[in-house]
Amino acid sequence: MSEQPSRSDATHGFQVLDFILGKEIASYVRLHKRLVVISMVLSAISAFFAVMPAVLIGPFIDECMKKGTEPASWKIPWLAIDPHSWLSWHRTEWVLVDKISQNELLVILLVVSLVSVFGKSITTYISSYAAAAFSNRATRSLRIDLFRKFVSLSLSYYHKRKSGELVSRAASDVTAMQNNIPNILMGYVENPLAAVVTLGYLLVMNYKLTLIVFISAPVIVGLVRLFGRKVKKNAVRMQDATAKVTSTYHETIQCLKVIQCFVRSDYEEEKFKKHTYEQYKRIMHWRRWDLAVNPVMDLTVFLGAPLVLIAARFYFNHSLGEIMSMFFAFSKLYTPVKKIVKINNELRTLQGITKRVFGILSTSPEIKDSHQARILPRHNKSIEFKNVDFSYSPEEPVLKGVSFVVKAGEMVAFVGSTGAGKSTLLDLIPRFYDVTNGAITIDGTDIRDVTLESLRGQIGIVSQDVVLFHDTIFNNIAYGRSGSTVKEVESAAKAAHAHEFIIAQPKGYESIVGDRGTRLSGGQRQRIAIARAILSSPAILMLDEAASALDAESEEYIKKAIEKLQGTQTILVVAHRLSTIMRADHVYVLEDGKIIESGTLEELIAFGGRFRQLYDMQFKTNSMS
């Protein structure tokens, strides 16, 4: 289980995370405060090492490279405060070592240089590792919450969206967030501090020259804002185009048999090329703005570099060592500024991704427990539809005024033309959808007033399109009841007439069924699905066209399995093959979303209506064949 992020625990020290990353992502990062603090503190320490090369290069040139044996000294610029007024200060020099040989000074500078490089390397490594840890932990929690959201959303949510695009949100978008979060947080700590430390050094060296250089600052700020807006806009478009490519991959694999059967590979390839070309264009538009900012800033800043050198040498009379030290410091000052601009672009990209991912997380499921929902006791009386209307959209009603009662332990069948609303009717009982009007009650209790877990936990479902996981036969059967023993699984398989073909598999119950059960035949998949439903001991068993696409032998096995269960569970069957419902206690005939006939099999045949018409068509066809 992931830790649920809570914003109520935000302290003043961590509100900066909300400001930098946004409240949504910050709520996940804040769960790992200790790692965030370690990363930021070490990043800050690392930033102080940035100025060391500039401090060392001056004495190296001016003192260590002097001709002759003249003693050398190491002085660094410093500020002296007037003892009579702390507001008055002037530049001076702090002598660290004095009157030593040039070689001794060289050794000292090398030792200090090695220590600073080692210190920066260690602090950078640990800081980066801590940042990777909190970023991965935060996005792990986010992935879990996103997965939890996916399985909690109503089926109607997925009818309106492509599953491949949702997969892209969960995969590529969250991975991009995982990469960007540590870069942004560390970058916004280390680079500004490095810039401030270096700027302080430059101001002490020559504040007038430093202020002159900063004339270009408004230009840089303007570039940052312009490029940031462009990057964010194009990042959203790029991620949308990537989601379409992912969706096409997903859809192609799912529909591969149809594509190959109808020889549409070339058509699908052309369609995919269009999506990849659109993705290419969006990526290039994003990269155009993302990459252009640095060269433009380089050109803006370094056009003034010759002027800085001339002013330092001829106007301020700095030595060569001081000039090189300042020039190096200016370059080190410019580097974090460039990185901040780059991080700003990453932040804009992150903001676009955040909007997409948290758009899913903020979606409220249409089907959920009410505040007063109570646990539904095990069904033992009746299931009743009371004048039920249902529609997927207001313009297209699917069920109209449907009413009936099913007593506990009965087997009831629903027949009718394709599109009459039979499968939809069954989907309403476990609340995959909610009724538009009317009510459905189980043992007199409206199903909207009970918890989804207690409702769905009593229902077993076997549909025409059986869904099996890429796992063993044993685990697929035991899926609905964790902790099942081998004996219990085998007993359910025998009841579903599946045991014989299972033990004939190379590894028996430990055989892998393949993706969606592709290594098994349709009849074998159906019997495993029935065994899975039997093992879960449902009070209500719903069979939706469970035998419609099976051969005669498989159909016979399914019939026998259903007959064994009759009387022990309430069974609701949707069937086109009327041979599978010959022992039904009651049959309802649906047409155009309405129940037009109901009764026992014998009564409906004698009535001579729509059911008799379906019966004659099917059994006369069978007798002729």
Image (cartoon, rainbow, N blue to C red):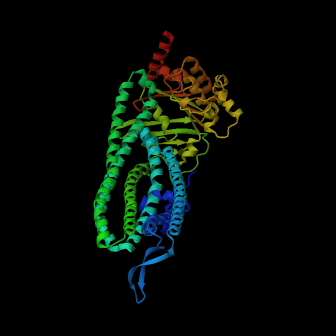
Q: Closer to the camera, 468 or 308?
A: 308
Q: Position of residue 209 (x, y in %)?
A: 32, 71
516 horizontally vs 285: left or right: right
Considering every residue shown, the one lying at the far right of the view is 487
**Is 539 drawn above or below residue 359 in the view shown?**
above
Considering every residue shown, the one lying at the far front of the view is 68
226 horizontally vs 203: left or right: left
Q: Position of residue 70 (x, y in %)?
A: 46, 73
Q: Closer to the camera, 307 or 434?
A: 307
Query: Looking at the image, can residue 538 be seen?
Result: no
Q: Quadrant of residue 389?
A: top left
**Is 68 drawn above or below residue 154 in the view shown?**
below
Q: Position of residue 295 (x, y in %)?
A: 32, 53
Considering every residue shown, the one lying at the far bottom of the view is 84
Q: How many marks?
A: 0
Q: Closer to the camera, 172 or 143?
A: 172
Q: Position of residue 247 (x, y in %)?
A: 41, 37
The residue sitting at 56% across, 50% down in the picture is 374
Q: Quadrant of residue 406?
A: top right
Q: Closer to the camera, 310 or 148?
A: 310
The residue sitting at 58% across, 46% down in the picture is 376
The residue sitting at 32% across, 58% down in the picture is 224
Considering every residue shown, the one lying at the far top of the view is 624
Query: Looking at the image, can residue 571 be seen?
Result: yes
